Image (cartoon, helix red, strand yellow):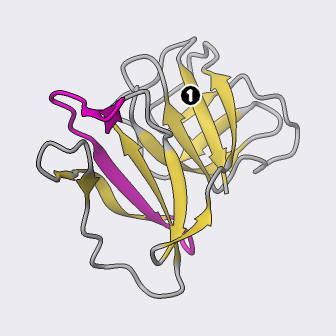
Amino acid sequence: MTNGGIAYPQYTPTISIWRLTDNYQVVISTVMTPLLSTGIFSYNFSSSVYGIPYAYIISGDTSISPIEAYKYGTVYQEVPDRVICTVVANGSNTASTFQTSRTETTSNYWSNTLCSFLTGTLAGQVQWVNGYSGSTYFITVTNAFTGAPSAGDTFELINF
């Protein structure tokens, strides 16, 4: 990544990749390779399958647009729908299910989206959402975060 053509010092982005056909995370927070000191990084995704859509997220710096979806090397969707949310204080919050500030009453409304934390101790962590309760406003993620989020932590839900 560059700032005015000058590479960011000591910047180490990581990449995570999901296969969208079954929401399986095929690459988990893997460090990308710098190309000299150009500010350009690469990742050799050798396990892609032609015709299967994938989503990736690059983390490590707040100035990066956090996600794009790709379909075997060509842009599948450049700007996904996303909403900013906060975690609501609730004694039942865990690393895999927690109450959100969303108020949609349709169950599974936020299923099959990505949850990316922007603040708090989970900042930079991303997980696939596989459930949303329209009565309690809890989301459930496929794989647990490293800990339960705190009340007021900000995250985004990214819909494909």
Query: Which part of the image, by quadrant, shows the N terminus?
Result: top left
Vertical arrangement, residue 25 with respect to residue 87, above or below: below
Q: What segment carries the magenta color?
A: 1-23
Q: Residue at x 58, y 43 (%)?
A: 140
Q: Position of residue 138 (x, y in %)?
A: 67, 34
- 104 sits to left or right of 49: right
Q: Residue at 29% across / 71% down in the picture? A: 45
> Going by the picture, which residue comes out furthest to the bottom?
50
**Quarter of the picture holding the C terminus:** bottom right
| Residue at 63% in and 39% down | 157
Residue 53 point in image, percent of width and height: 55, 74
The image quadrant that residue 134 belongs to is top right
Picture quadrant of residue 24: bottom left
Q: Position of residue 106 (x, y in %)?
A: 87, 45
Q: Tell how many labels.
A: 1
Q: Residue 9 at x, y = what percent?
A: 17, 27
Q: Nearer the viewer, residue 136 or 39?
A: 39
Residue 57 higher or lower than 102, as above or below:
below
Which residue is tagged 1?
Answer: 155
Q: Is residue 59 magenta?
A: no
Residues 8 and 160: in front is 8
> In the image, is residue 117 above or below residue 143?
above
Residue at 55% x, 40% y: name it: 115
Specify the quadrant of the image occupied by residue 43. bottom left
- Residue type at mark 1 is Phe
Report helix, strand or loop for mark 1.
strand
- For the residue pair 95 and 120, the one nearer the viewer reads as 120
Q: Residue furthest front?
A: 5
Q: Look at the picture and state if 90 lies above or below 6.
A: above
Say whether residue 139 is left or right of residue 33.
Answer: right
